[in-house]
Amino acid sequence: MSQSISHSIQEILLQSVIPSFGDIHDIRLSIKRGDHNSMKSIISKVDDIFDEVLIEYANHIDAEDRQILLLATAEPIFCQRVKEGVFEAIYSERLCPPLDILAGAMPSDFSRHPYSINSGDANIPVHAVCIEYLPNICNEIYPLMVDSYVCDLAKHWRQRRLVIGIHADWLDENLHAKRCIYNISDSEQLIESSFTDPIRIDSVHFLAVSPEFHQLWSERFAKNDIHQVNPYQSALKADDKFSCYCQLNNLSVPSPKASLIKQSEISTLDDQALIDRCNTIFSSIFENEADQEITLVVQPNKGTEGRGVKTFSGPLNWSAFLATHPELPDYIKEIARNDDVLLRRGIQNVKILDDLTDKAVFFDIRVNVINGRMESGFLMLAPPDAVIASPEQGGHVLECKIGAQWMLSAPEHAAPFKWDQTLWTEIQNVAQKTALPFIDCGVVGIDIRLEWRNHRIVAWVLDINPRPAGLAHSRYFETREPGVSQCLWDTLPQQGNLSAFR
């Protein structure tokens, strides 16, 4: 029912609203880049037509279904979640089974549940993926549900854990789930519903949350002695990019030279003093640079997913560089309104052939390291003629599929050359070494960029993310099959509680 209503609204939007912004890909990109007008227009239109769609839908169903519809739409959360599902479909591509939003409360004893989602064993532990941002979240949760189920069957011949998705608003005062997203494993079906009795949680993993949200709820789960995959205090070390850079230097992990200007410092500097400060940093970052054309990356120290990152390319001479980019000091001050500012050397001389555009483009490698072991990941490609490789900045993802033959180009190579096993080994060694200071996070996403330097390829670590996104794109590097992790699940609490569902 929820899907039928959602599809009806989407059809109206595609006919009457979306064309004014271009095609669906245009509006997705504009929203990701912060176009709030597009987002507000869509949300407003959904609110305007919602009741009309319900009336039309009711005219085409039988009396029994109309009664169910009446009960469902009497629940504010049902209407809210259907509307959010519409926006999610417009905002991004679905990479998992569709989500059915049920009306009313389901039994917490899953053996009596109308949708059989496990063996009915009330002793099965529950692992919750806790989220703050709902749009597109099933793309992140579903791969973990499948991984856990496959791991249990492969190693133990039975399902030993239930993975659910929860929003903080769906928890009661005891941190039990009043509502959740769950998977019907034998039918690849995703369901969201409330429960007659809240479900006790044995372990939790934070994804799609802000650092502030992470801190608040991590502390609450800690007080209830609930195991956390990525507790806030462990993630805190990775949220600070300059702190990560310093730790990686101590480990002799390649990381592009960087310097930090604190927000408090920038507020005390006049325009000339800020330019002088940048000059000093510029000279330090590029002091051993051989190329006469360089790139400076400017970004928020605690930003994520490419937000706020900007590159400035120009001559190695500071005066000429500033003349090329007179807007640089103003951009630094713009970031400093909300964060410290990180300046670092840009890496941009190894490209990959993008079959989508048939051009050589810059790219980053996202690797997922779980409990210190690199298991999975994907590639993030930049748009042609751009440096930043992030879907948020108009790039796209390249999955590590079976049979992929990636060709790279770099200076000193007259022709493209193949990505070989030696390079994979180098990336794995760098990624696993990088993860050592963050081993308590359990799961970290590490972004790596390649550079041809001193007659060899260097794998430079750009970022460490304790709440990695893009899990639906992840594939195991060894088998190229879809998945995030198999080694995570046996490190979680295994013994459920007889009162797990109460």
Image (cartoon, rainbow, N blue to C red):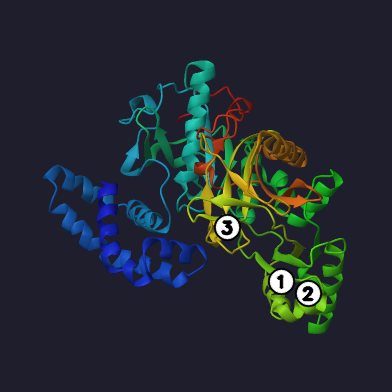
Dividing the picture into quadrants, the one containing residue 196 is: top left
What is the three-letter code of the residue carrying label 2? Ile
**Dot 1 and dot 2 residues touching (CB under 8 Å):** yes
Q: Which residue is mark 3?
A: 382
Depth check, mark 1 against mark 3: the one in front is 3
Residue bearing the label numbered 2:
266
Relative to 171, say whether 113 is above or below.
above
Amino acid type, callout 3: Ala
Depth check: give the residue in front, 19 or 333.
Answer: 19
Q: Earlier in the sequence, mark 2 or mark 3?
A: 2
Q: CA distance from mark 1 to mark 3?
A: 26 Å
Q: Is residue 171 visible?
A: no
Q: Residue at x 44, y 41 (%)?
A: 180
Q: Count every numbered label the image shows and give the total.
A: 3
| Residue occupying image coordinates x 46% and y 39% | 142
Q: Residue 336, labelled with which disc? A: 1
Q: Secondary structure at mark 2?
A: helix
Whole-percent x and y of residue 446?
Answer: 67, 45
Q: Quadrant of residue 428?
A: top right
Q: Earlier in the sequence, mark 1 or mark 2?
A: 2
Please determine whether, in this image, residue 236 is positioned above or below residue 203: below
Q: Could you tell me which secondary element the residue under label 1 belongs to? A: loop
Q: Please rate how many residues cluster around mark 2, counting C-alpha atoms within 10 Å: few if below 14, some from 14 to 19, many from 20.
A: some
Q: Percent x, y for residue 70?
A: 21, 51
Of 37 and 498, nearer the camera is 37
- Mark 3: secondary structure: loop
Between disc 2 and disc 3, the foreground one is: 3
